[in-house]
Image (cartoon, grey):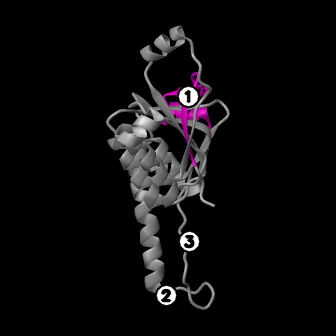
Amino acid sequence: MFQLHAGPLGNTVGEERENMKKPLVYYINFFADITDKSVRQVMNVCSNLLDPPKASQRANKIDRPNSICLSISSSGGNVDAGIALYNFIRSLPIETITHNTGIVASIANVVFLAANRRYAVEHSSFFLHGISKPYQGSIDGFSLTRAQLLEALNGVDGGEVTMRKIIAERTLLTNEELTSMFHVGTKETPELALSHGIIHEIRELKLPPNPKIYIVQPDK
């Protein structure tokens, strides 16, 4: 379930003409964990914006955007869901923008790096660390069999390898640097993120008049 928020109507003719000249940007406010549910919301919003159902298009006057901007603050979450969202954003046939408005941590870094243009506000941060895998269904408290341990370790190793590969491809960080950063857990300021190629610019998020904003609803 997502919500659309728009500013008040009533622009003058001159303002409407000026707005027609500007690229149309839709904003998705992602202040949530990376979960199957939140990822599906983003995918559904993007799909409907690019190819809106005719009934919805007539009712809501949905215009195809020139760009989609994901303003994101997320502590991470499900690695598989995050990688799926990364690949989805990379596949979109329009310009994509991500803007760190708080903290981008763990698998949320991979989602953030999917965009063509990437920004961060001054008072924001990035946090890179290795992944953990919660285990459910253990017998006799926390006891695990060798097979269960190997399965868990393989899942963690595989997830981290994929994360490091994506981050290395999209930034100036090497796989060796990322391995070390994942091991100790590393917090990046916007200035460090800029020097490492994580972002293209440090800038505040400034919404235009009457912005089109979709809000991703966090899991309850």
Residue ID for mark 3: 134
Q: Earlier in the sequence, mark 2 or mark 1?
A: 2
Q: Residue at x 48, y 51 (%)?
A: 41
For the point 45% across and 44% down, which residue is it? 45
In space, the residues marked 3 and 2 are separated at their CA atoms by: 15 Å
Residue type at mark 3 is Pro
Q: Is residue 81 magenta?
A: no
Task: Give residue 143's quadrant in the image.
Answer: bottom right
Assign a secondary structure to mark 2: loop
Instruction: Give the side of residue 67 with respect to residue 202, left or right.
Output: left
Instruction: Give the label on residue 211, or none.
Output: 1
Q: Nearer the viewer, mark 3 or mark 2?
A: 3
Label at residue 172: none
Q: Which mark is residue 145?
A: 2
Q: Nearer the viewer, mark 1 or mark 3?
A: 1
User: What residue range appears in magenta?
Assistant: 189-216
- In the image, residue 82 sits, relative to residue 169, either above or below, namely below
The percent coordinates of residue 183 (x first, y second) are 55, 57
Q: Secondary structure at mark 1?
A: loop
Quadrant showing the C terminus: bottom right
Between 91 and 12, the one lying in front of the other is 12
* Residue 174 appears in the picture as rendered: no
- Residue 93 rendering spot, x and y as whole percentages: 31, 36
Out of 181 and 119, give the one closest to the viewer.
119
Callout 2, which amino acid? Thr
Q: Residue 67: horizontal and vertical position, in percent? A: 42, 30
Q: Residue at x 49, y 37 (%)?
A: 198
Q: Residues within 10 Å of mark 3 (few under 14, many from 20)?
A: few
How far apart are the alpha carbons under marks 2 and 1? 54 Å
Q: Nearer the viewer, mark 2 or mark 1?
A: 1
